[in-house]
Image (cartoon, coloured by chain):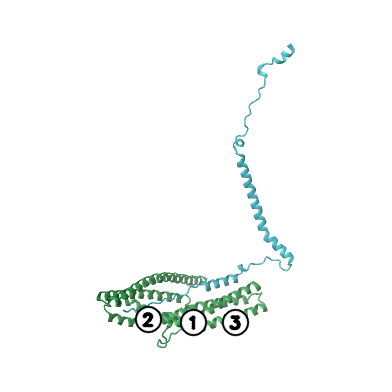
Chain colours: A cyan, B green
Amino acid sequence: MDKYNQNIDIPHENITKPSPKIPTSTSIKKTNPKIIALIGLLGLGLLSLIVASIAQSDLPNRTNLSSSKLNQTSVETPISVSDNPWQIELNSILTNLTSEAQIPIISVEENLTF
Amino acid sequence: MVFLILFLLLLLKSNFILSQDLISQYQSDLSYQQDLYNQSYNLYLQKSTVHQQYNSIATEKELIDSIKETAQFRNSLLITYLNLISAKLDVYKSQDISPNTTTIQNVLNQQNIWLQNQPTKITSISNKSQLDQYNQQFSQSYKQIQQYINNALIQSQVNHQNLIISQIKNLLLKIKASPNFDSQAQNWIVEIESQLNDSTNFISQALLQVKTDSLESYHNYSDLYQEAKPLLDSSKQNLFKVIENISGVIKKFI
């Protein structure tokens, strides 16, 4: 009995109490998981947009490359007709021809009598 | 020397912009004056009906006042119209190697001065006999005004289309100088030049309707423009085809 009592009779100071859980990081606890998910989704969206734009900007080059492989004679990137200085000059002439407003025709009563 | 050329180019460009502004101003003035004249003319028609119905001294006076007012608005409308026409002729005047444009402008300016002197004469009209006398004077001047308005309508379009033809010819010269210009392209250009000549022929025919000679042999001057108009329209349509064909040459060969 004494044997057991010795074990029980532990000095009070030596008993280690479980320490209360102190939050290590207050910000994690405050951030709403929904907001984190939203930011994540936005990030993914932005990333996919960047990837898509890179892929699109690369597309004409790849098309030109494939066409140059098909048609070995054309290696250079073809110049757009609309960029041709003569086509630009021709468009300007066409604008001159179409935009000219003609003199309106008016008529008045010649004989204002009774 | 370079600065002088640049200065002259800027001066020409600024003159063109100024004349365009002037044309816009005259166009809005013309629309305003046309409204005033129409309102006054409608009132004159009403007064005329009333006078025919009652034939009194009071209705006669009202009718004379209404005629005088309408004559003043008619005068202002014609002055604005002649200003617009003269400004429009100025824009492409350099394309006319004949003296036609200058002659038309001179006559229209003389008529403009005549019109500017009319308000005092109109104000002094006080009875039917003075009114009849004034109407005779106006009819004589108005015949010449009509003749030269029709001349101006034709000449203005001719000058504009001549400018387009000249610009097209300049472009064709540049295309011909291209290293890619081969015999096939040469054939296309020959066809285009032939089409361009068609436009020149239409314009020459339209110019036959510009009458700067005596007035006696013509009565209805608006007919002259009506005869010239289909020729000018054909020339313009032809120029559209020429431009389309040149575009084809640029796409295929250049």
Asked whether the beta carbons under mark 2 and mark 1 sit within 8 Å of each other, the answer is: no
Residue holding disc 3? B194
Q: Chain of mark 2?
A: B
- Residue B31 spot, x, y in % from top left: 41, 70
Horizontal side, residue A82 vs residue B4: left or right:
right
Residue holding disc 2? B142
Residue sitting nearer the eye, A107 or B83: A107
Q: CA distance from mark 2 to mark 1?
A: 21 Å
Residue type (three-letter) at the residue carrying disc 2: Tyr
Q: Earlier in the sequence, mark 2 or mark 1?
A: 2
Residue holding disc 1? B228
Asked whether the beta carbons under mark 3 and mark 2 sit within 8 Å of each other, the answer is: no
Q: Chain of mark 1?
A: B
In the rendered image, the vertical position of residue B72 relative to residue A14, given as above or below? below
* Count of numbered tags: 3
Secondary element at image label 3: helix
Q: Chain of mark 3?
A: B
Residue sitting nearer the eye, A37 or B35: B35
Residue type (three-letter) at the residue carrying disc 1: Ala
Asked whether the beta carbons under mark 3 and mark 1 sit within 8 Å of each other, the answer is: no
Name the image quarter holding residue B54: bottom left
Q: Earlier in the sequence, mark 3 or mark 2?
A: 2
Residue type (three-letter) at the residue carrying disc 3: Ser
Residue sitting at 53 percent across and 74 percent down? Answer: A97
Image quadrant occupied by the C terminus of chain B: bottom right
To the question of a shared chain for discs 3 and 1, the answer is: yes
